[in-house]
Image (tube, rainbow, N blue to C red):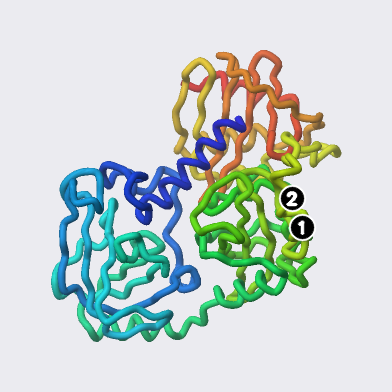
């Protein structure tokens, strides 16, 4: 299960960064840029305002196809464009009177000469001097005309960016901020869910593998309190710290600012890939994490030794899709609401728990059941020979109810 989750996380990271990647780490066509089955909506305007380094109203003056053999792109004709813009006005940061945006491989803009755009750009230029949009297609808003563009820019200017505040907070505790990473949006777990991590929040920037209660404790160390915003929409803005931006090496440190109701309510740092999360004040421990070989225990110690009602603890009835696979090669999806409800109801009882154990084997009798929500996932590993259902992220195993076992046995 752990290996499957890590592969899924790596794929999400690749998809998220494909359209802003340098040559050599790209997809061969735009199919990779399409949303996945479980993808939610795009980033909100305030989140993109926080993520962008430059926000500009500009007009297309030239659109060039980047072809193979030019030294700028490596995969074939019409897979990317270099779009030259004339600046009209800026709402954040600065840019020259004419600048170039690299639109590929996803080519979100479909730009033509004379088109007016409000662009949300990363401030770090590519080796050829071109810039890239952030927020995928939401980072390039095509306007009907200059008046519409001016109105949109006015709406942007009405939003106070919080990235400067987040950067200042990290720097106050001694961190060197080297660049922005990503911005994510999701619903913060409800108060009753703060002590559990099994309903994994679907994020691009970093894996929130610990209970949100842990992030609340870390935030409190910096004088912040996210708890009053439990269950509400939040934004997570992440930064690269200490090392070069976009550098994923063992020990890369990311700083995170949690934003709710347009205020910073939480902050912590994490050490990539899986060396744990730390208070922004605990710089020495975070820097020492990779060399110390510290890796959080997995599975963790049983977080519900008192027993658990899985359906209610993880709100399974609100799942949108159930995906499943087995060691025998069975795989599929359940989208029928009645069948999803049946799975949820089969786990709607208080069950005694035991410590979950990690077993990397994938026998044909093993099943992996994944509940997908709007912005989260929940996974159960089920061994049909013993009837044991494990929620590895929260460290517990239960004897599966007969109704659940029957539903799994009936999967085709």
Q: Which mark is residue 284?
A: 1
Give the residue number, with chain letter if any, for mark 2. Answer: 288
The answer to whether the residue labelled 1 contacts the one labelled 2, judged by CB atoms less than 8 Å apart, is yes
Q: Residue at x 73, y 34 (%)?
A: 299
Q: Position of residue 326 (x, y in %)?
A: 53, 21
Q: Residue at x 72, y 44 (%)?
A: 291
Q: How far apart are the alpha carbons under marks 1 and 2?
A: 6 Å
Left or right: 75 as drawn, with respect to 44: left
Q: Position of residue 97 (x, y in %)?
A: 27, 82
State which quadrant residue 343 falls in. top right
Using the image, determine if residue 395 lies above or below residue 36.
above
How packed mark 2 is, by other alpha carbons closer than 10 Å (few <14, some 14-19, many 20 or more), is some
Q: Which mark is residue 96?
A: none
State which quadrant residue 371 falls in. top right
Q: Secondary structure at mark 1?
A: helix
Is residue 34 in view?
yes
Q: Residue at x 47, y 34 (%)?
A: 334
């Amino acid at each position: 299960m752990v290996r499957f989750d890590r592969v899924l996380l790596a794929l999400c990271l690749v998809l998220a960064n494909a359209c802003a990647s340098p040559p050599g780490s790209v997809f061969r066509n735009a199919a990779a840029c399409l949303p996945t089955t479980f993808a939610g909506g795009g980033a909100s305007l305030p989140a993109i305002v926080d993520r962008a380094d430059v926000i500009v109203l500009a007009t297309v003056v030239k659109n060039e196809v980047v072809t193979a053999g030019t030294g700028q792109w490596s995969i074939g004709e019409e897979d990317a464009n270099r779009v030259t813009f004339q600046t009209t006005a800026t709402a954040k940061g600065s840019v020259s009177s004419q600048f170039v945006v690299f639109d590929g491989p996803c080519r979100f803009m479909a730009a033509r000469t004379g088109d007016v755009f409000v662009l949300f750009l990363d401030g770090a230029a590519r080796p050829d001097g071109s810039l890239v949009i952030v927020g995928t297609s939401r980072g390039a808003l095509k306007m009907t005309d200059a008046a519409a563009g001016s109105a949109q820019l006015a709406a942007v200017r009405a939003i106070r960016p919080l990235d400067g505040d987040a950067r200042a907070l990290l720097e106050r505790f001694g961190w060197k901020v080297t660049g922005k990473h990503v911005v994510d949006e999701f619903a913060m777990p409800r108060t009753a869910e703060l002590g559990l991590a099994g309903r994994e929040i679907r994020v691009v920037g970093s894996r929130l593998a610990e209970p949100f209660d842990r992030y609340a404790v870390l935030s409190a160390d910096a004088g912040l309190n996210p708890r009053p915003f439990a269950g509400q929409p939040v934004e997570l803005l992440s930064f690269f710290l200490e090392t070069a931006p976009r550098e994923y090496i063992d020990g890369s440190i990311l700083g995170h600012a949690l934003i709710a109701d347009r205020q910073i309510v939480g902050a912590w740092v994490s050490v990539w890939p899986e060396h744990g999360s730390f208070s922004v004040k605990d710089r020495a421990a975070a820097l020492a994490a990779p060399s110390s070989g510290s890796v959080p225990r997995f599975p963790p110690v049983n977080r519900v030794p008192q027993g658990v009602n899985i359906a209610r603890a993880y709100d399974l009835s609100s799942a949108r899709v159930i995906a499943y696979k087995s060691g025998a090669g069975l795989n599929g999806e359940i989208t029928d609401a009645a069948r999803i409800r049946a799975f949820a109801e089969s786990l709607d009882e208080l069950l005694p728990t035991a410590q979950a154990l990690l077993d990397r084997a994938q026998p044909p009798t093993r099943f992996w059941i994944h509940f997908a929500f709007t912005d989260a996932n929940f996974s159960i590993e089920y061994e049909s020979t013993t009837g044991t259902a494990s929620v590895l992220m929260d460290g517990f195993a239960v004897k599966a109810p007969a109704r659940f076992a029957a539903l799994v046995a009936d999967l085709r």
